[in-house]
Image (cartoon, helix red, strand yellow):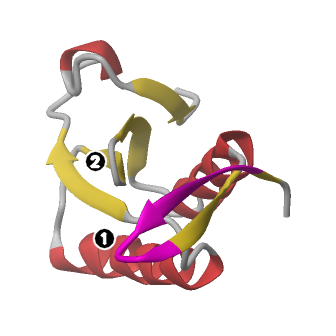
Amino acid sequence: MTHSDSTEHEGRVRIAPDHACVNDALASHLGSVPQVKFVMTEAIPNALLVWIAVDNPEPEVRRRIYDQELGLLTEFPETDFDFNLIVSMGRPAAELAGGSNLIYSRPE
């Protein structure tokens, strides 16, 4: 894994993985759930905000998304993810999470 920077957190130095590596993994893991339409991210101090957009967040879809989130937490234990599941209701990604970076969009 490629590392890009480090930060002081609770008295210890944490190595943050390269953003491209994390974004690729987010797109791959979350994009594997067929109902996921978009994945967007925004880096803020001490966390990586992740928005996962679906049209219909029925319980089975949420369970599959949560399983992927757990895999990402295990794969990147040094990254503080803040996952947010949002209902897209057919809206484009730009209307869902202003200021974020679109890292995955399901082809129509």
**Residue 5 on the magenta segment:** yes
Left or right of residue 24: residue 31: left
Give the residue displayed 30% in from the left and 70% down from the top. Answer: 61
Q: Secondary structure at mark 1?
A: helix
The three-letter amino acid code for the residue at tag 1 is: Val
Q: Which residue is mark 2?
A: 54
Q: Which residue is mark 1?
A: 61
Q: Secondary structure at mark 2?
A: strand
Q: Position of residue 59 (x, y in %)?
A: 17, 78
Q: Determine whether 101 is above or below 57 in the image.
A: above
The part of the image, by quadrant, that contains residue 44 is top left
Q: How many marks?
A: 2
Of 108 and 73, nearer the camera is: 73
**Residue 57 on the magenta segment:** no
Left or right of residue 104: residue 96: left
Q: Position of residue 16 (x, y in %)?
A: 62, 57
Q: Position of residue 108 (x, y in %)?
A: 52, 26
Q: Position of residue 12 (x, y in %)?
A: 50, 77
Give the residue displayed 45% in from the left and 83% down from the top. Answer: 70
The part of the image, by quadrant, that contains residue 35 is bottom left
Q: Determine whether 36 is above or below 108 in the image.
A: below
Q: Residue furthest front?
A: 11
The three-letter amino acid code for the residue at tag 2 is: Val
| Magenta extent | 4-12
- The reply to whether callout 2 and callout 1 are in contact (CB within 8 Å) is yes
Q: Determine whether 60 is above or below 1 in the image.
A: below
Give the residue displayed 18% in from the left and 60% down from the top. Answer: 57
Give the residue displayed 26% in from the left and 72% down from the top. Answer: 62
